[in-house]
Amino acid sequence: MTWGIPTAAFVTVHVVLSLIGIAAGVAVLAGLLTGKTFGRWTTLFLVTTILTSVTGFPLPPLGIDPPRIVGGISLILLGIAVTALYVFRLAGAWRWIYTSCAIAALYLNVFVGVVQAFQKLPFLQPLAPTQSEPPFLITQLVVLLIFVGLGIRTAVVFHPELGRGRTNATT
């Protein structure tokens, strides 16, 4: 039992939240790449990604380990992104702080998704049983490079002086 819920059901909720967070995050990223914020998609991304991290902490085995460290980093990034967006309304430097933190949090969610895919999917498990083999490392490197490239592109497009920098809260 995890928080009074059977652990298997809790894990299912955790995974569903993660997948929704990734899908919504991709929509938000697409908006940022066109210089827009998508209000409802952004809220869905932030809420589900925060809940993904929060629901990861009570899962067994308990203790400080890499997944919890990633979850903690993600929560810090998401807290800064929420503050930048909802408190400071993307004014000045808060614009690039928001995009950087939101994209980094999305990356961490995808990073964990890749880890889980190599652990759980039968066709990927044999390629990297210890997750130190080249297929796993190359996949994670490619994902990182994609996110770095998208982050740089977003910083330019979403910057008020360098790019279009529109902040239409479109849904």
Image (tube, rainbow, N blue to C red):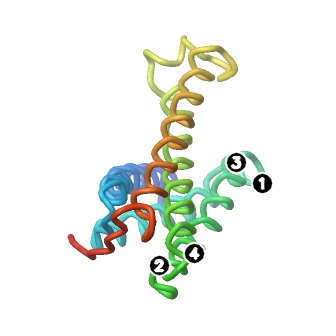
Tell whether 156 sits left or right of 1: left
Q: At which x and y percent is residue 39?
A: 29, 74
**Local crowd at mark 3 within 10 Å, few (<14), some, or many (≥20)?**
few
Q: How far is the residue under mark 3 from the one under mark 4? A: 40 Å
Assess whether mark 3 and mark 2 are in contact (beta carbons under 8 angstroms): no
Q: Which residue is mark 2?
A: 90
Q: How far is the residue under mark 1 from the one under mark 3? A: 7 Å
Q: Which residue is mark 4?
A: 93
Assess whether mark 2 and mark 1 are in contact (beta carbons under 8 angstroms): no
User: Disc 1 residue type?
Assistant: Gly
The picture quadrant where one finds residue 137 is top right
Identify the secondary structure beneath mark 4.
loop
Q: Nearer the viewer, mark 4 or mark 1?
A: 4
Q: At which x and y percent is residue 95?
A: 50, 72
Q: Nearer the viewer, mark 2 or mark 3?
A: 2
Q: How far is the residue under mark 1 from the one under mark 2? A: 36 Å
In the rendered view, tell whether residue 17 sits above or below residue 108. below
Q: Residue furthest front?
A: 161
- In primary-sequence order, the first of circles 1 and 2 is 1
User: Disc 4 residue type?
Assistant: Ala
**Local crowd at mark 4 within 10 Å, few (<14), some, or many (≥20)?**
few
Residue at 51% from the left image edge and 86% from the top image edge: 88
Which of 153 and 84 lies nearest the eye of the viewer?
Answer: 153
Q: At which x and y percent is residue 80?
A: 59, 73
Q: How far is the residue under mark 2 from the one under mark 3? A: 39 Å
Q: Is residue 1 visible?
A: no
Q: Which residue is mark 1?
A: 63
